[in-house]
Image (cartoon, grey):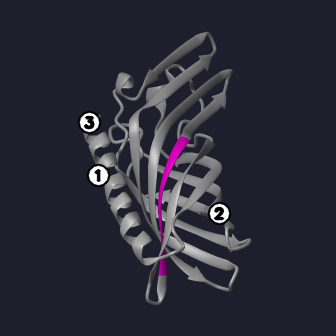
Amino acid sequence: MKNRFMVALVVLAMAGVLFAEEEKKDDRGIGVRGAFGFSGVNGGEWRELTYDYTGDYKNPDAGFTFGGGLFKIVSLDAINLNLGANFMYRNTVSVSAQGMSIDVTEMAIEVPILTRFSLTDQVYLEAGPQVNIILGDPKISVFGSGQSYEGTFEDDGLERSSPEFGITVGAGFVINEKISADVRYFYGLSDYEKKYAKGTAYTIQLGINYNL
């Protein structure tokens, strides 16, 4: 647990230093981003969460994600980098069948480092690595079929991967000099859960960006 928070503090400190240094060089400053969408897990084995549930453990439904943070566009000669730090709520596992509802929720800091490719003055593509720092232990909620349980991954002998590494791709549209919108897809390259469930995380987000 302590290691997760230390990594989060280091990542945020590095992002803060980079933003501050680039602020001196670029009068565009930084911007804020709000996003919402869906988060889920590809594959995995979720029997550890479901007790006597006998349905499909390998394809849980996606849940809702939302949050926001800061971004900075950094110009490096012929390319532009989009650096961000976003604080997100994520419902990553959602199973609803046979009268039961099972959900896993978590808080995370998402740090994308994206290269931006401009197709026109208004349309652009983005792609690059992303690291996610999971804050605390994911929470598990099970309701229905005579059961009611709330706990954490640690309570159930599970261990969430953090930091989590993956690739993000997306596209955006510049509405005016202050506002732009984008769509992003994150695909995790790390195991979502280390011990039993495994699987890989993914998110699909619609974001609104405002240049300060």
Residue 66 placement, left or right of 133 = right
Mark 3 residue element: helix
Mark 2 residue element: strand
Dominant secondary structure of the residues highlighted in magenta in the image: strand
Q: Which residue is drawn at 61% across and 83% down?
A: 118
- Which residue in the structure is indicated by mark 2? 183
**Percent x, y of residue 114:** 48, 70
- Cα–Cα gap, marks 1 and 2: 28 Å
Task: Please provide the residue range marked out in magenta.
Answer: 80-89
In primary-sequence order, the first of circles 1 and 3 is: 3
Amino acid beneath label 3: Lys
Circle 1 residues within 10 Å: few <14, some 14–19, many ≥20: few
**Percent x, y of residue 54:** 57, 26
Amino acid beneath label 2: Val
- Which residue in the structure is indicated by mark 1? 10
Q: Residue at x 50, y 59 (%)?
A: 187
- In which quadrant is the C terminus drawn? bottom right
- Which residue in the structure is indicated by mark 3? 2
Residue 79 visible somewhere in the drawing: yes
